[in-house]
Image (cartoon, grey):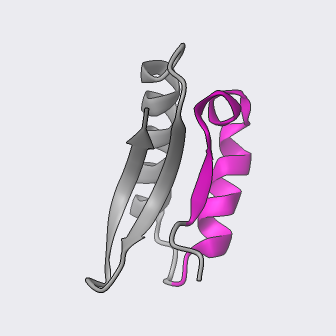
């Protein structure tokens, strides 16, 4: 079971095109993709790319919390 919609190391995330990241998120999304969700992801991607410059670690979007059935928007491990 994949617990997130997107996961990568931070440096690769920063260098990846935002449309590619959005594609991963959209293709793993099990719900109807509404415009607000898409725009929210794009804002998060842009902000995180600027905030995480020079930081090593990993990033996950839409991480599912085991046994709770809820998702965290973004997890950054440094």
- Residue found 36% across the figure and 57% down from its top: 73
Q: Tell me the quarter of the image containing the N terminus.
A: bottom right
Question: Residue 12: x, y in percent?
Answer: 70, 33
Span highlighted in magenta in the image:
5-30
Q: Does residue 32 sit above or below 27 in this rendering?
A: below
The secondary structure making up most of the magenta span is helix
Q: Does residue 65 sit above or below 45 in this rendering?
A: below
Question: Residue 8: x, y in percent?
Answer: 64, 46
Depth check: 34 or 56 in front? 56
- Residue found 42% across the figure and 41% down from its top: 76
* Residue 6 sits in quarter: bottom right
Q: Does residue 18 sit above or below 39 in this rendering?
A: above
| Left or right for 8, reference 38 | right
Question: Residue 54: x, y in percent?
Answer: 54, 13
| Residue at the limit of the structure toward the left, as seen here | 68
Depth check: 2 or 6 in front? 2
- Residue found 35% across the figure and 79% down from its top: 66
- Residue found 39% across the figure and 60% down from its top: 36
């Amino acid at each position: 079971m994949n617990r997130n919609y997107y996961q990568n190391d931070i440096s690769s995330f920063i260098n990846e095109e935002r449309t590619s990241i959005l594609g991963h998120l959209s293709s793993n999304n099990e719900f109807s993709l509404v415009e607000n969700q898409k725009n929210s992801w794009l804002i998060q991607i842009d902000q995180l790319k600027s905030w995480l410059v020079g930081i090593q670690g990993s990033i996950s979007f839409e991480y599912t919390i085991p046994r709770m059935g809820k998702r965290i928007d973004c997890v950054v491990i440094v």
